[in-house]
Image (cartoon, coloured by chain):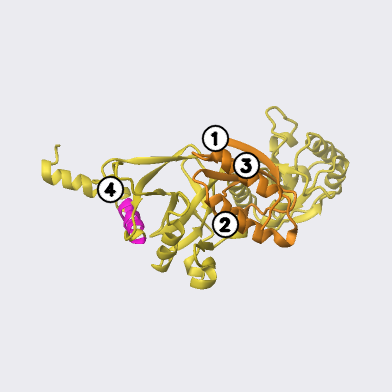
Chain colours: A yellow, B orange
Amino acid sequence: MAPVNLKTIVREFNLEVIADFGRLEDIQIAVADVTRPGLQLAGYFDHFGPDRIQVLGNMETAFLERLTPDDRRQRLDALFEKGIPCLILTRSHAAWPELVECARKYEIPVLRTQDITASFTSSLVKFLNVELAPRTSLHGVLIEVYGEGILILGESGVGKSETALEVVKRGHRLIADDLVEIRRVSDTTLLGRAPEIIRHLIEIRGIGILDVKELYGVSSVKIQENVDFVINLELWDEKKHYERLGIHEEETDILGIKVPSITIPVRPGRNLAIIVEVAAINFRQKKMGYNAAKALTDRVFGPDY
Amino acid sequence: MVSRTVLFNCDEALQMKAVAVLIQKASAFRSSIWLSRGERRANAKSLLGVMSLGIENAAELQITAEGSDEAEAIDAIASYLAQPEF
């Protein structure tokens, strides 16, 4: 897990910097949680997480406004003293001189947004969750086919990139070729994207590097997509057993999440793009409750089999 | 599985070429070969993957190889990265 520095947050949310003491790049946020320090301003600090971003909204500012400047300074000082990473004012609330004074004393940045508190904190938590999620990079291709994010894995030279190119040509979208960065953004969701340096590039042996976005247009690419389904491509092995019916459910483990997967044997002359496309449709159909293999057994052996 | 850390030693103007030759060298082995830099890990046989590591001169790289010819593979890749010739 890589922490996020404050500068990234300021840039992402277009925050106004009231005071930064040149520390925006040094301060790292490592928890995906923010605090509205209502109780803390009232003097209660048990269970306080000083590593969280502090947000002052309408309620907190109204409370502080009612105090005398001296009292206000004391309470803010108690909060800053804990070594919080930064303090953010929402709804463009003005910063009292006492607040800036305390911030200067401990060199803690003060930032401001015009957004309302609830929507700001929820987007901030969502952003932090994605940035701080456990991550891994896999050698493969991520494409979106009929709305399903499909991760194609397999040895070098098995034809992943060629398959991706043809899938794109058939009207679907490329997210990443060669190296896919995957983050576990929740207990059920994996999000994949390409490292920025090689985003939307594809390498085809014999031709070289292609820029899919320039060649096929914006509608042929996507920045990120969930990993819904994994297709393992491997060279056809005469001795290995491949799924014939589609009743057996295979899974691939990525960052502790089990993703439904299939293994497709590759042999010259097999049109992989069509196979990938039909696997995506079939996967959607199974998700919606219909399984062709199950329907066939029902027909052959009766529904009670 | 074998693993080793090396420093990439290459003049800036030659980097792109050096990476292309590296891929060719890696592809000649049967083993799976991985290069890691920081938290990013790329297949040494994939051009875009290695490019995405953003290797510059004096970058510290970890090489990992697994397979029937892993020992030869790691020797070849490590000595190439420490002194690219093409």
Find the magenta span and give its range. Answer: A273-284
In terms of secondary structure, where does tag 1 sit? loop
Residue A280 on the magenta span = yes
What residue is shown with label 3?
Answer: B75
Circle number at residue B1? 1
Q: Is residue A49 above or below residue A207?
A: above
Say few, some or many: other residues with alpha carbon within 10 Å of mark 2 (under 14 / 14 to 19 / 20 or more).
Answer: many
Q: Please indicate, yes or no, whether residue A14 appears anywhere in the rendered image.
A: yes
Are callouts 4 and 1 both on one chain?
no
What residue is shown with label 4?
Answer: A289
Say few, some or many: other residues with alpha carbon within 10 Å of mark 3 (under 14 / 14 to 19 / 20 or more).
Answer: few
The percent coordinates of residue A60 (x first, y second) are 71, 43
Q: Specify whether A204 is left or right of B7.
A: left
Of badges 4 and 3, nearer the viewer stands 3
The kind of residue tagged 1 is Met
Q: CA distance from mark 4 to mark 1?
A: 43 Å
